[in-house]
Image (spheres, rainbow, N blue to C red):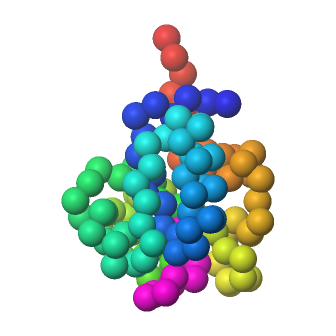
Amino acid sequence: MQSASGLTALLVEDEELVRNYIQHVLTQAGFLVLSADSHARALEIFLGERVDFVVADWKLPDKNGQALLDYFQGVRPDLPFLLVSGAKPDVPHLAKPFTPTQLITAVWAILGPLPSLP
């Protein structure tokens, strides 16, 4: 698995068990994870912390993941963003349930290739 040292993920998931699972997988892969359980909390974190990419649930209690995507990419158009969902939204997403390998593969797909080490 590639090293993720130095990269910070913003995880937005309202279901505690799912949030803990995703946070564990990302942490084990070497990412620092900041987590939020709502759209409002995600905005607070995004505005106050350095975030390298976002993993967000499609269905949140206060807004959907598409609203987050639209806002975040309006502020930072280059921000990598991965939607995850148990539903079937009409946008590209990682379908729940997923394995740790599927999650990490999807994350690296949005981050792009890492530069070669000297």
Helix, strand or loop for the magenta stretch, by majority? loop
Q: Position of residue 19 (x, y in %)?
A: 56, 63
Q: Quadrant of residue 32?
A: top left
**Looking at the image, which is closer to me, 43 or 70?**
43
Residue 26 appears anywhere in the view: yes
Residue in view at x 31 percent, y 63 percent:
46
Up-down relation of residue 20 to residue 42 (above or below): above
Magenta region: 56-64
Q: Total of numbered circles in the picture?
A: 0
**Looking at the image, which is closer to me, 43 or 114?**
43
Up-down relation of residue 105 to residue 36 (above or below): above
Q: Is residue 59 magenta?
A: yes
Up-down relation of residue 69 to residue 6 (above or below): below
**Looking at the image, which is closer to me, 107 or 35?**
35
Q: Position of residue 4 (x, y in %)?
A: 51, 34
Q: Position of residue 24 (x, y in %)?
A: 59, 47
Residue in view at x 45 percent, y 72 percent:
37
Q: Position of residue 112 (x, y in %)?
A: 56, 44
Left or right relative to 47: residue 110:
right
Up-down relation of residue 106 to residue 19 (above or below): above
Extreme-top residue of the structure: 118
Left or right relative to 96: residue 113:
left
Q: Is residue 5 magenta?
A: no
Extreme-bottom residue of the structure: 62
Q: Quadrant of residue 57?
A: bottom right
Residue in view at x 57 percent, y 58 percent:
20
Residue 70 appears anywhere in the view: no
**Looking at the image, which is closer to me, 88 or 74?**
88
Extreme-front residue of the structure: 17
Residue in view at x 67 percent, y 30 percent:
1
